[in-house]
Every structure is written in structure tokens, then in C-alpha cells.
Amino acid sequence: MDFSEKYMSNEHQEQYRSASESADPSSLSPLMISTASPKSPRSPRSPRSPRSPRSPKCKPCGSQSSPLKNLRHSHSGKHSQPKKGGYGGKGTWGGLLDSEDGCVDDINDPNYVTDKEDIKFIVKRSEKFEDFKKKAIVMVEEYFANDDLISTANELRELDMLSYSFYFVKKLVSIAMDRRDKEKEMASILLSSLYGDVIDPQQLYKGFQKLVESADDLIVDIPNAVDILALFIARAVVDDILPPSFLTKTMAYLSKDSKGVDVIKRAEKGYLSAPLHAETIERCWGGSKNKTVEDLKAKINDLLVEYVVSGDVTEASRCIKNLNVPHFHHEIVKRAVLMAMEKKQAESRLLELLKRSSEEGLINSSQISKGFSRIIDSVDDLSLDIPNAKVLLQSLISKAASEGWLCASSLKSLSLHPGKKAVEDNTLKAFKKKAESIIREYFLSGDISEVSCCLEFENSFSVAELNAIFVKKLITLAMDRKNREKEMASVLLSSLCFPSDDVVSGFIMLIESAEDTALDIPVVVEDLAMFLARAEVDEVLTPQELEEIGSHFPGVDSIGNKVTQMAISLLKARLSGERILRCWGGGGSCKNGWTIEDVKDKIGKLLEEFEAGGGTREACRCIKELSMPFFHHEVVKKALIVLMENKNDRMWCLLRQCFDMQLITMNQMSKGFVRVGECIDDLALDVPDAKKQFDKFVERAKVEGWLDSSFG
């Protein structure tokens, strides 16, 4: 390109000729020119800079062309890629898929993100888990070979991989399932030994969940895997290392066609619902070499004999705990009571041992009642060796009940007149008429205490058959009336505290006569199902007793089966307790129906009154008058919260009194503590040391016997 002198100074013309002469046109390209060295000095941004004066306007000449003619080179000294495809160039973002070779991430860039550390962590964690798997298999094999509990526990503890313990549980059980009964028994004993100390309860729970989920795979190698795994789960429940709720919670998320469903059903209905299931499951694989039933009985007998001589309650309690057979504690109760009946001088010491064991939660109320019930069952045979056995036994029951560690109403009836074993027909007829009169009067007055007095007079010996007849008559008359009377019938049934066996017999009689009742009451199935469900909610019946009622009617199309299945369905529904309680209006005994919010408000007010100086007995009476035993966990929850906020030990005394009176059961106590634990983070906003206080309360409750030792 030529420039005339008109437009270019002599100095610039000389510079231009020098550049043109020194350049080789064949070696130049637009790309080379545009790709300048990054170290080249940058020109000032302003085109009018004195160091880079703007060139005068120029015009091209047609005869010659410069090699720089078509170059789009920035005179500012800034370098950028040429435009291609309509993008790029100075001041633009470039193409969507453009990438620059040699690009390096700047870690100081605020938008810089890397997952290299996360990848390293994941790889390391995966390698750690694979290493644990190999070591777990070795430990299991060594344990089966050596039968060394302590060594296995130490090895697992030294690995210090608590979050992987679930895999050890899964591998231990899955390997044992394909071995002999000896290894199965060893596996169960090892789990019981490691539970809580080495293996966290949640990890053991998760391990069994993994086993149920893998049932479809296990059955490929172990044809009877369903039955064996169900037995392992039942054994874990009996050994108190797996909560019974595991069955329902695990069933909820399993697919219907999964073998895991069969495992859960087999464990629940095939093993845990059977009579004397605890003893049967304990001996399912021949029993531990240290824990056969005969050995246990011998140890219990030696323990009691030694205690009678020494009188050391602490040592006797330690020995009972070391037996590690909580489901067999009824044998201790039975033998202690028998020894007290045989040796009058040892009576006070033996009763003191049972009382202390109950207060410390070493022997629960269910095992105590079961022990006494077993003696009542065999009292006629005992009378051959102990002439006044019935009188002595009645005396012991009265003493235990007066001291508060035995619930006499939960025991079977003890007749002091052996000549009157069967109730005569004329007595039955007279009682039926009187019972109907008592019930009709109750529906008019709503006076429960009057009903109790009349029953005590008419059935002074608490004959089981008469109690069952009264239950049948009460519900039959209520079903033919309005919801008010149905509600009153349920309230009366929970207030009378009949032995559960008598209530079961009454419901069986009701279902047996349901076909005749249906002629007058078309909705008899629905009403009976609701009464059954209400009885369980009110803790008059247990879930096992509901299953027992259903077992009397095996036919799929039988009325009994329909009633029990409908009752079970009602109980499985969400918020079933509250709904069933209000099924007939709630409240009972002529009271207006209460909502749950009303009950919570009443509980809050009675605790406030007690905190302000009210009496313990009055507070217990108010709690009892709520007639909502299934909702007593709300009392526990609110009392603990008040205790945290005010640090007044009176609330603890109230809970102790309620527990000693059996007003609040261990189950309701546990639910209350669980609910407080769930909201502990929210409580910490108002009470900074709430977590610390709660842990202290849990340990204290375990010592008091309110919570199971496995609670955590």
C-alpha cells in the first residue's frame, strides 16, 4: 500500500519502507501476525496517545498491495483470536465449545470448584470398607473355629470402624445360616454379647434390615433361608437386642413379592406368637452349652439358697443380671415364692429381693406376674405338699400388691374353695340376670365405682368364667345401643382391670355367638372389630392376645377371622390410637368427646397445678381420670420438659409414683423419653444444657427401672 506525502510525514514514510523491505511476504500469515508474544509490551489504550499517534487518513493504490493489506491487527497491542463462524474477537465470550490449550485452573478464582478432594475421600472410604469386609469374614471364621467371645469382641473393637458394624452382623448371620445348629447358636450368643458395648443398636438394626433385603439372594444358596432368617430375627427379639417394632417397620418398605415379607411374617406369626415362644426360641438350636433350661433352673435355685443364707441383695442382683436371661426371670419369681411358702423364716428376705429387683428394673412387671401366675396354675398340686398353699399364696400376693411391685388385677383368679371348681348352671343363670341389671343401671348413671362394688359382691372369688360372661354381656348390650353406651362400655372395661385371659375368653364367646347376634345387629362384625381395637388401644389386651383370639377362628370366611383382621387393619392405620379413641365420641361416662388438643391442654394444666404445690395423689387421680392410658407418654414428655426448665425434682417424684402405681407403663414411659429425645435440639434453644440433662434423666430412669437397659 502506498501513501502519498500529503497524508504521511517523511518520518513515517521512512519507517514504512524499512518495514516493507525487511519483511518476507511468503512467510507472513494472518494467524502469525495475530498471535503475538504474551511478553510483548502493551500499547496504551487511548488511540490518541502521544506514544502512538493516530495515522492520517489513507487511500489504497491499485498497482501494488502490501502483505499486511487484509490483516485485522489491533493497533492497541491487545491480542485475541480471529473471528470464526461469527463469534470471537475482541471483547467477546468466544464460541460455546471453545477451549484453549494450556488452560490452567486458578485456585484463587472465587468460582474455582474442584471435587478432587471428594473423589479422594470416596476412594479412600471405599477401600476402607473393602478392607473391613475381608477382616469381618476372617473374624467370623475364626470365631466359629475357636468360640472365643472376648477375642472376637477385642478384634472388632480394635478395628475402630463402628459405622461398618452392620456388615459384620450381616456376614455373621449369613455365614451361620449355611452352617450347623452349633454355629447358629454361637452367632446368636455373639450378637447378644456385643450388643451395646461393641456394636451400636442402630448398626445391629441395620444389619438385620440388610439381611431381610437380601433374602431373595440368600435363598439361592440356602433353600430354607426364609425359615432360618425368621428364627434369627425372633431370637434377636427374645434376647432384647432387636425391638419388636422392627417387624412392622421393615415390612412397611418391602415390596410385596419380596422374600423378605415371608421372613417377617414367619418370624411374627410362626415364632413370636406361639405359646411359651421365648423358651422355645431360646432352645431352637439346642441352646448354649452354658444355658440349657435345666442348668438355668439349677443356677437359679443355688442363687436363691445362697441369698437366703447371706442376705446380700446386691450380690444376688448381680448374679441375676449375669444370668442374662430376662425372658426367663419368671422362673426366679416362681422359685422365690415357692421357697417363701416352704420356709416361713425366709419369706421376708425373698420378698425383699423381688421388691428390689422390681424397683431397679431387673425383673419387669410382666415377668413378676407370669411367675405368680405359674404358681397359681399349679397350686392344687402344691397343696399335696403344703396343706395351706392357697392361703399362703394369697397372703404373699396381698403383701406384694400392697408394696406396689405386683399388679394383683393382672393375675388369674385364685379360688380358696377347691370344691367349687366349676360354676353351676343355676349360678350362671342368676349371675347373667344380675349382670344385665348392673349394666343397664350403669348406662343410666355412669357410676363405675358402683359397678365395681356390685361385681365384687356377686363374684367375690373373681371366678374367670363369670368375668368372661360379664364382658360378653356388657359389649352385647352396648352394641344394640347408641355410641354413648358403646363408649361407656369401653371405659368400664378398661376400668375394671379384669385379668386379660378373662377378657380374651369374653371376646371369644362374643365372636362365637356373632352369627346369632347379627340377626338383631347387622353391623356386628364392624362393632366387634372396633371394640377389639379399642381394647388394645386402652391396653386391656395385648397384640399377642389379639392374635390369640384370631387363632380360634382359622377359617378365611369365618366371622371371627373377619373381625380380627378388621381390628388389625384399624390398628395399623395412621394415628390409629387417637381415631379409635374418638370412634364413639370419646370421653365416655357421659363426658363430652375430647380432642387430642383438649387432652394435651388438660395434661399441661394438671402439671402446672402440681408444680405450683399440688399433691402427688391428686395429680395421679387426675391422670387416671383422663381415661387415656395409651396417651400417658404425653404426661412423661411434658413432665420432663418442665423438669429441664425449672430443675424441680417434684416432677420426677410424680413420674416415680405413677410408675409404681402402674398408672404409666414402661412402654408409655419409653415413648415419652423418645419424644423428648426427638425434640431435644429445639429445647436446647430455650434450655442450653437440655441435651446434658436429658442424658442424665435417661440414666436415672434406667436405674429406677422405667427404661430398658438397651434404651438409647
Image: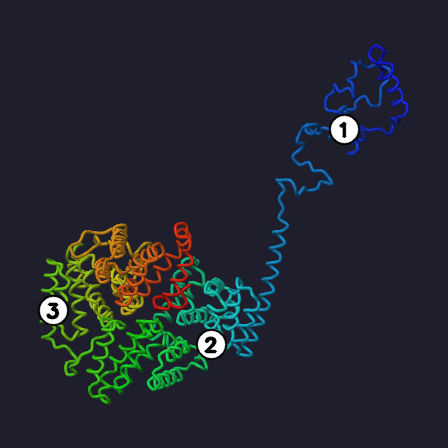
Secondary element at tag 2: helix
Question: In which quadrant of the rendered view does residue 424 lie?
Answer: bottom left
Looking at the image, is mark 3 or mark 1 earlier in the sequence? 1
Q: CA distance from mark 3 to mark 1?
A: 114 Å
State the residue in front, 108 or 243: 108
Image mark for residue 211: none
Residue extending furthest toward the right: 21
Q: Which residue is mark 2?
A: 185
Percent of width and height locating residue 263: 43, 66
Percent of width and height locating residue 578: 28, 54
Q: Which residue is mark 3?
A: 432
Q: Which residue is mark 1?
A: 42
State the residue in front, 395 or 441: 395
Percent of width and height locating residue 178: 51, 73
Q: Hey, what amino acid is under mark 3?
A: Lys
Residue extending furthest toward the bottom: 385
Q: CA distance from mark 2 to mark 1?
A: 84 Å
Mark whose residue sits in front, 3 or 1 = 1
Q: How is the image coloured?
A: rainbow
Looking at the image, is mark 3 or mark 2 earlier in the sequence? 2
Assess disc 3: are there few (<14), some (14-19) or many (≥20) residues with their C-alpha within 10 Å of its C-alpha: some
Number of residue marks:
3
Where's the C terminus, which quadrant? bottom left
Using the image, determine if residue 651 lies above or below residue 333: above
Q: CA distance from mark 3 to mark 2?
A: 53 Å
Q: Is residue 434 left or right of residue 371?
A: left
Q: Is residue 340 left or right of residue 421?
A: right
Q: State whether residue 391 appears in this view.
A: yes
Mark whose residue sits in front, 3 or 2 = 2
